[in-house]
Amino acid sequence: MYEFINKYKNKYVNYEDLKDKAVFIRKNDKTYFGEVLNQRKHGKGIIAGGNYFYAGDFQNDTKHGIGYERNQDGTSYDGEFVNDQHQGFGTYWYADGSYYEGNWCNSLKHGEGLYRKGDDIEYYGDWKFGQVDGKGYLKTKKSKYEGEFKNGQKNGFGIETFNDGICYRGQYVNGKAEGQGLLIGDGFKYEGEFKNGLKHGNGKLIVDNVEFEGSFLNDQKNGYGEMKWPSGSHFKGYFLNDVRQGYGQMFWQDGSFYKGQWHNGKQQGHGRLFNNHRLISTTFNTNKQNIEEPNIPQLSTIQSSNIRQNITRSRISTRSRISTSCSSPKKKFCQRNSTVQNN
């Protein structure tokens, strides 16, 4: 008896608890040693078999109260149980070394909790029946995100900062930027509409002090838009796949202007050119050599959908009452040390 208890003892069950009031029960491939009531496991006890064991509280033949459980697949749980289910506050260790510490309902993560997987992923925030849902903070190897989640993905308003310094602030749908948002990076700023993580719809883009305001499609300038350069030159017209295409008007800082057709970013087709105090109406097949046009920087800002997590949160006491309801999960954290002594 002593050897059995000593092998599986932990902070919840020890020899002194059981030496005068425990019985052995063997059933199938498992052995129970602990207190009983009406021939049912009730009180403190240990059940073990193969690579599985549980040490803690029982009630009416089920794990109920505080206990530690180690499963055959290498996972383990330390915390509160209700009718054999994880319920209340507890810590669950996965076989790969990751863990979740927080609130549970019917063996599902529910309420507030912290999930950490090495240095790859860390999430702290709200959960709903096993999925990230509500407000939370997520850190991955590529970015940090703080905002709203739904069904395990970024959904709603959030702020995401990438390791390269780019920051997005706005709406998300299914993990990607969608709706109104603001994207800022080194030398550029975009404010406007997004879809599926790309600039899509109406927006304003500033790159190296060159401004474009107009229509975007799949992260490129498409449709009508206006561009302005710091020198005072500006363009009004149509774009296709990030270059001027169709009718447009270009005004240079020296007073020259061109109004007419564009193809692949150059004057081509019928148009009117005013230069050197002369107005020319003709058909163009290339840019006029004596007109120097400022460079038009292009920018692609495909949003990354990867998330990760890092949080440093203080843990609070593990002592808690057992919750038998899913409606009001407890929110508390603590530093846990649930090592089971094996001799």
Image (cartoon, grey):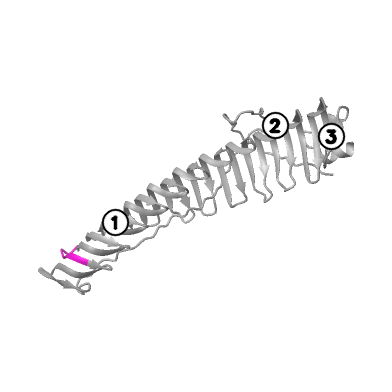
Q: Is residue 11 visible?
A: no
Question: Where residue 197 sits: x, y (%)?
Answer: 42, 53
Q: Is residue 316 magenta?
A: no
User: Pointer 3: what residue?
Assistant: 33
Q: Magenta residues, as a range?
A: 252-261
Q: Residues within 10 Å of mark 1 (few under 14, many from 20)?
A: many
Q: Is residue 243 above or below residue 35?
A: below
Q: The disc labelled 2 sits on which kind of residue?
A: Asn
Question: On the rendered structure, is 245 left or right of 335?
Answer: left
Mark 2 or mark 3, which is nearer the start of the sequence?
Answer: 3
Where is residue 342 shown, x and y percent of the image? 82, 44
Q: Secondary structure at mark 3?
A: strand
Q: Is residue 72 above or below residue 87?
A: below
Q: CA distance from mark 1 to mark 3?
A: 76 Å
276 or 36: nearer the eye?
Answer: 36
Per the image, label 2 sits on a secondary structure element best described as loop
Query: Is label 2 in contact with label 1 (beta carbons under 8 Å)?
Result: no
